[in-house]
Image (cartoon, helix red, strand yellow):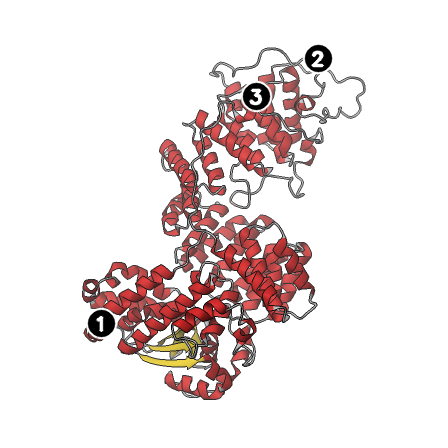
Amino acid sequence: MPTSSSTTHRSTKPPRRAPWSATTRTASTSSAWAARSGSDRAGGGRPPEKGLRRSPVPLFDGGQSPLAEVVMSRKSKAPPPRRSGGPGPARPAGGTLGHLVPKAGPTAPTAGRSGPTPKPTGDPRRLAAEGHRLLARGDARGAERLFREALALDGHEPAALSGLGLVAAQSGHLEPAATLFLKAAEAQPGAPDHGVNAGSALWRLGQRERALGVLRETARRHNRDHRARLALGAALMDSGHLDDAEAEARAALALKGPDSEARALLGRVRLRAGRPADAVPALEAAAQGAPKDPGLLSDLGLALSAAGRAEDAIATLRRAAEAAGPGRGAIEIGLNLAAALLSTQRATGAETVVRDLLARAPDHVGAHLTLGDVLQRQGRFEAARAAFSAALEQDPGNVIALRGLVKSGRVETGDPVLDSLRTAATRDLAPAARTEALFALAKALDDARADPGEVFAALHQANALQSRGRPDDIGPRTAQVERALDLFTPDLFETLAPLGHDSERPVFIVGLPRSGTSLVEQMIASHPAAVGAGELGVMPDEERRLGDRLATAEGLAGLAQEEVRTAAGRVLSVLDTAAGQAGKPDALRVTDKLPDNAMRLGLIALLFPKARVIVCRRDPLDTGLSLYQQNFADSVPFANALETIGRATILHDRIMAHWKAVLPLWMLTVDYETLVTDLEGEGRRLIDFLGLPWDDAVLRFHETDRAVYTASKWQVRQPVFTGSVGRWRRYADQLAPLRTILDEAGLLDRGV
């Protein structure tokens, strides 16, 4: 999944001493790794499948070793440099592992023989080359025997050292593998593969800084080697050095031309940097050269999804899942597919995918977590709790599972989840995980009526972590409001109204987040002639497409009817799709309840002069409290501080006053407090505004079978209650900064 670009730091100049000359670590291992090279235990067995969770730097296998080809060729060049001196009499007769890695013994003697093992004879280079051939054919045990014989003759034979390292790595013994690759790199500094393999083994051991040092030195020594540059680039990407990683990907492309691996790296770096639109072309080009690579297809699917090409993303992820096959290694790709389906509000399809994954891997934590999320969105909270509990059985203390339990119902005093969350909130977790734990803890404490000071202590920590390195958006929002007030005038709408589409199907529900928009939509969606499409991104997309045309009076005046109708057609297509997915293709009204479309009502009026707009309002202190309690991740930057919540509330009130004065649209204001105290009266007013006949199903909104994809998925499943009115009073002291700002703006005595 893509992240925003982070600040990167250029690496310092590497030291003169090569990293592989560092003191070797010791490890206790079996002398016959090959006997277990096919095991499936964690940390052992075969290397991870390509494209799935793995080290960013792949080990080069024996079949691709350039050394084997050189040794057996009649045209071979001069042998690689060796150290002076022989192996010495102290070496174990069965091989040199004991010499290289203390505590490792010789190869077991052949069954049926007794007495000392005979001293190996022959050419160590030819023995090593034959060992690589055996390894390429899958005979790891035979390859290990030949590598050991070669090293008994010459303990610095690089092909044997690297071959024995490959056998060790394939059987999960990464410490001795790294040692062997480093020794091979010392013995043959002209071959970059040894350094790349050493870096990969160290990376898999978690020694990332040391691995980066080895890979940097390898790429410096072999700056014309395509693989060395790719390996360094992949490690830099996974370390967050995205600018340097992109430079390595470009260097690899310059060395080898249109190469799939280099293009894939370039695309992945751009995806990590939060540039999915730039990532897609590189990943698409890479996929043309590797159309069956499941990991590459999965990354392309993620990039397409992040770039807003949802249908292409789902199709590509289905191809990735098919290419990955039925094994456990395909689970991550399946989870990506489920996430893409959820992002397009297809909870039923996502559930089918996840249940299939769990049939193959019933103990997979991620699959249980995703199933819990899917079930929550469908309002099946007891089943969701069971899924999250299953995840906790496999991974006690899992923060996402604990959060899921908290969001699947109310937490009572004495519930064990409170202590689990208190513990999780104090653990040394990654910032994102600790943020989740703190928000969940605050919600659980609030449910259990804990001390308001303890609740807000958790909220202050959570919001501080969430906002770290991420500025609020008050500046851009202020500029957007000022621009709207200047540009969108009654004269403009009178001039441009004939350009828009005359459809009455679109209904836009707007307001501050947490002001009741989800409840209003759930009531409308319960009507047989209406569909609730959730929070769609289609209007922000159209705003981006029109770009500068909306920024100046000249740009707006220059809009052509074809341009406006085309944009409206794209919006209607999204609404049509939502209606079809809801099983109501002929629905007369389809809602888009993205709250922040309040900032885009000018554009909406240009595209759809006959659209309906429902404005949700609520006591701003209740709204502000709910905003501060909610983990919005990156979607509502102003929600991480009470002061910025206050300033955003003032801006919202200002822009809505302007729209009510100038827009030629049908608009209805719904106050949350009135709605929950007079459900039928407000419900009838709402349905009448939409031009629909009354239906009693509107009052049974909590029984409506539809997935909900917003933070209110729990609340809209409950019968209406007034407990959320005036909630702020319990936290009056903690909300003092917000109260001061709102009071100065005159907004404490009415809904916003």
Helix or strand or loop: what does disc 3 sit on?
helix
Q: Earlier in the sequence, mark 3 or mark 1?
A: 3
Q: Is residue 498 left or right of residue 16?
A: left
The mark closer to the camera, 3 or 1, is 1
Q: Earlier in the sequence, mark 2 or mark 3?
A: 2
Q: CA distance from mark 1 to mark 2?
A: 93 Å
> Is disc 3 in contact with disc 1, using a CB cutoff of under 8 Å?
no
**What residue did someone put label 3 on?**
158
Callout 3 amino acid: Pro
Quadrant where the C terminus is found in the figure: bottom left
Give the label on residue 541, or none. none
In depth, the one of 4 and 80 nearer the eye is: 4
Residue 31, quarter of the rendered image: top right
Callout 1 amino acid: Leu
**What residue did someone put label 1 on?**
499
Q: Position of residue 376 (x, y in %)?
A: 56, 67
Q: CA distance from mark 3 to mark 1?
A: 74 Å
Helix or strand or loop: what does disc 1 sit on?
helix
Q: Position of residue 523 (x, y in %)?
A: 47, 80
Q: CA distance from mark 2 to mark 3?
A: 20 Å
Q: How many marks?
A: 3
Helix or strand or loop: what does disc 2 sit on?
loop
Q: Earlier in the sequence, mark 1 or mark 2?
A: 2
Q: Position of residue 664 (x, y in %)?
A: 27, 78
**What residue did someone put label 2 on?**
89
